[in-house]
Image: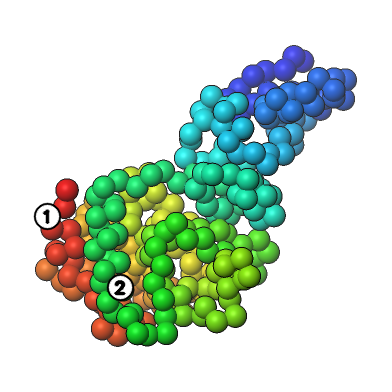
Amino acid sequence: MKSINYKEGIVITATELKKNLGKYMKCVEQQTDVVITKNGRKFARLTPYVTDIEQYFTVRENALDYQYGGKKVSYEEFMEIYEKSTLRMELINGEIHLLASPSIYHQEILGRLHLIYNEYFAGKKCRVFLAPFDVHFKKKEIKDPDVMQPDILVACDLKNNVTEKGRYMGTPTLVLEILSESTRSKDMIDKLNTYMLSGVKEYWIIDTKNENILIYNFEDYEIDRFKSFEKGQIASSIVFKGLSVQVEELFSDLI
């Protein structure tokens, strides 16, 4: 059986691989996946070990796909790639996601929220940080952490959780994400799950499409309660009493 080229790579049988191993190793060297079948079913994949993500996207036709080819990488592999790259990226459930540049609309909302948060936490123990700011989320009973850049985070455990290189390795008490069309599902499902399992206490989701705010409260690594705040209402933190946002004012007179 001859090899077949699909979008996912070259599909061959196990017998074909045994006969022409050198040939298919060269395919992998050229950044082409090789999918192996046995008795008509896919059971294995040869995939490039990539440490230069810019080179990867230069070689691939779909260079700037939001997701890094659906490939699974370890935390150590991600960090090796990340340290050599100039691109903004996140690691979620073993998959690398590239971060697109935010829109003016996103940045204006972010700026308004940052002013509110900064004013509330002025003089307090907890500190407010804006993306890009890497956080290594260690999930309950899962070996490899996720690495993500929340739009806003509140860290109350900076003492003993900042490395010599200035990298924060703690767990934020509160995180906030501003939804966009390209990140909507990821923020509302994958990130929510990571935040919940890593010990975050509160998660704010700013829904720009519906112009509302969702607030989740986590206890014992589970959702304890959540609430949606609409126009005309005040979104109030559960963990930080007095931290609040006027929903209508947040979304009014935007560019």
Distance in Å between CA atoms under marks 1 and 2: 20 Å
The quarter of the displayed image where residue 211 is located: bottom left
SS type, badge 2:
helix
157 versus 17 height, above or below: below
Q: Which corner quadrant holds the N terminus?
A: top right
Q: Which residue is mark 1?
A: 253
Residue 247, visible in the rendered structure: yes
- Around disc 1, counting alpha carbons within 10 Å, would you say few (fewer than 14), some (14 to 19), or many (20 or more)? few
Identify the residue under disc 2: 117
Above/below status of 237 relative to 254: below
| Disc 2 residue crowd, few under 14, some 14–19, many 20+, Cα 10 Å | many
Single out the residue that lies furthest toward the top: 2
Percent coordinates x, y for residue 76 in the rendering: 69, 54
Q: Which quadrant of the structure image shows residue 162? A: bottom right
Q: Residue at x 41, y 76 (%)?
A: 127
Residue depicted at 42% across the width and 59% down the height: 131
Q: Earlier in the sequence, mark 1 or mark 2?
A: 2
